[in-house]
Image: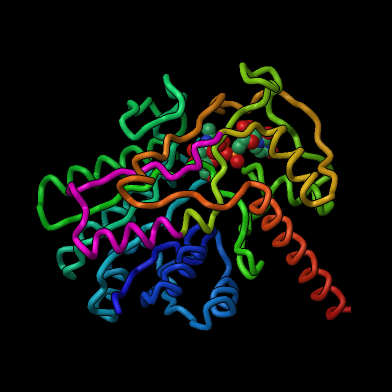
Amino acid sequence: MAKILVTGGTGYIGSHTVVELQKAGFEVIIVDNLSNSNIDVLNGIEKITGIRPVFENIDCVDYVALDRMFEKHPGIDAIIHFAASKAVGESVEKPLMYYRNNLTSLINLQQLMPIHKVKNFVFSSSCTVYGQPDELPVTENAPIKPALSPYGNTKQICEEIIQDTAHSNSFYRSIILRYFNPIGAHPSAEIGELPNGVPNNLLPFVTQTAIGLRKELKVFGSDYNTPDGTCIRDYINVVDLAKAHVIAVKRLLEEKAEKAVEIFNLGTGRGLSVLEIIKTFEKVNGVAVPHQFVGRREGDIEQVWADPTYANNVLGWKAEETVEDTLKSAWAWETKLAQQRAEKKSSEE
Ligand code: UD1
C-alpha cells in the first residue's frame, strides 16, 4: 500500500482528498497546523471511510519538525501539498505572512524530498495564475498574467519553484493542479467547508445566509460585461476535485507522467454567474437567499472558466457531478452544522 503525505489534510479540499485516497487503498499521513481547520475533521473522515488517518500537528514552515516527521514515517511515496494561506484580501494586508507561509512550506518540502527519497509531488495551484484570460475557455497554455494579490503571486512563484527544482534535478516528478472554484461538500455531510469567521468565498456566504447566520449576501458588481451583469466562474464539485488528486498520484507512482512537471486545469468547462448560482441554489434547496447588489470587489476577475480537455484526455479525469447536486450537498452540510450548534447549545443549557 503506497503511503501518501497530505499537507493541509484537515482543510476543505485536503479532507475530501484524504477520503478519496483512503477509499482507493492508500495509507495517508496528514500534516496540518490547524491554523484554518479543526481537528474534528478527523472524526468526519473516519466516519466515511472507517479509517482514522495518521495526524501530525506540524507547521510546514518548520523544517526541523517536518524532517523529524519524515524520519518517523519512513517510506512516503508521494506528497500532496495543500497547506497554504488562501484568503486574497488577507494577503493584501499581510503580504509577508503569505510569502513566508506559502513559499517556505514549499521550499522545505522540496528540500526534504531527496533527503527522504520522496520523488512524487502534487501541488495545489489556482486559476488565479491566468488573471483575466484573453481567450475563454482558458487552456493550460494561456499566458500567466501579473498577479492581482500577494496570494496569487505566491501561487505563481510556487509553480516557478517547482519547475526550477525539477529542471535542476531529474529526481523530482510533479503535477501542478490549477483549480477553478471548488464548492459543495461530501454527500455524507460528514465533511465540508468550514470557513473561519466571515466567509470570503461565495458558496459559504450563500449557505450561511440561507440558514440565517448572515442577513444578506452582497453580490459584488452587477455591471460586468456578462449576460446578467454578474461575474462568471467555473464551479467544480469538491469530491470531483479530490478524485483528480488520486488520479494524479497514481499517474506519478505508475511513472506515466510525460514530463518532469505536468500542469492540468481542474474545472467543468462551464461558466456560471453569481446570480445563476444563487437562483439554482434557491430552486434545488427550496430556500431563499436574501441578496442585494453592491459595488464591484477590488481585484475580481470578470469571467473565467476552464478548458478541461487536457485533463480529460491526458489525466483521464472529468468533472461528473451536476451543479444542482453540488449545491444540494453544500446545503446539507450547512444544515448539519446548524444541527450540531443546536445540540451543543441545548446540552449546555
Ligand atoms: C478567489 C480568488 C482565487 C482563489 C480563491 C480561493 C480572487 C480574484 N480570486 O476566487 O484566486 O484561488 O478565491 O478561495 O479573489 N461573490 C459575491 N459575494 C460574496 C462572495 C463572492 O458576489 O460575498 C462573487 C465574487 O465577486 C466572484 C464569485 O462570487 O464573482 C466567486 O467569488 P469567490 O468564491 O471569492 O472566488 P474567486 O474570487 O473566484
Q: Going 47% across and 42% down the picture, which residue do you hit? A: 267
In this rendering, is residue 269 above or below 298?
A: below
Magenta residues span 243-270
- Residue 112 % position (x, y): 21, 64
Q: Is residue 269 left or right of residue 111?
A: right
Q: Is residue 118 visible?
A: yes
- Residue 162 % position (x, y): 24, 47
- Along the line of sight, the residue nearer the viewer: 285 or 196: 285
**Quadrant of the drawing holding the C terminus:** bottom right
Q: Is residue 150 visible?
A: no
Quadrant assignment for ligand 1: top right
Q: Can you tell which quarter of the image residue 218 is in?
A: top right
Q: Going 61% across and 16% down the picture, which residue do you hit? A: 225
Q: Can you tell which quarter of the image residue 201 is in?
A: top right
Q: Is residue 78 left or right of residue 331?
A: left
- Residue 257 shown in magenta: yes
Q: Going 44% across and 28% down the picture, which residue do you hit? A: 131
Q: Can you tell which quarter of the image residue 70 is in?
A: bottom left
- Residue 275 % position (x, y): 72, 32
**Quadrant of the drawing holding the N terminus:** bottom left
- Along the line of sight, the residue nearer the viewer: 56 or 285: 285
Q: Going 70% across and 34% down the picture, which residue do you hit? A: 276
- Residue 76 % position (x, y): 26, 73
- Residue 69 shown in magenta: no
The number of numbered badges drawn on the structure is 0
In this rendering, is residue 71 above or below 191?
A: below
In this rendering, is residue 179 above or below 119?
A: above
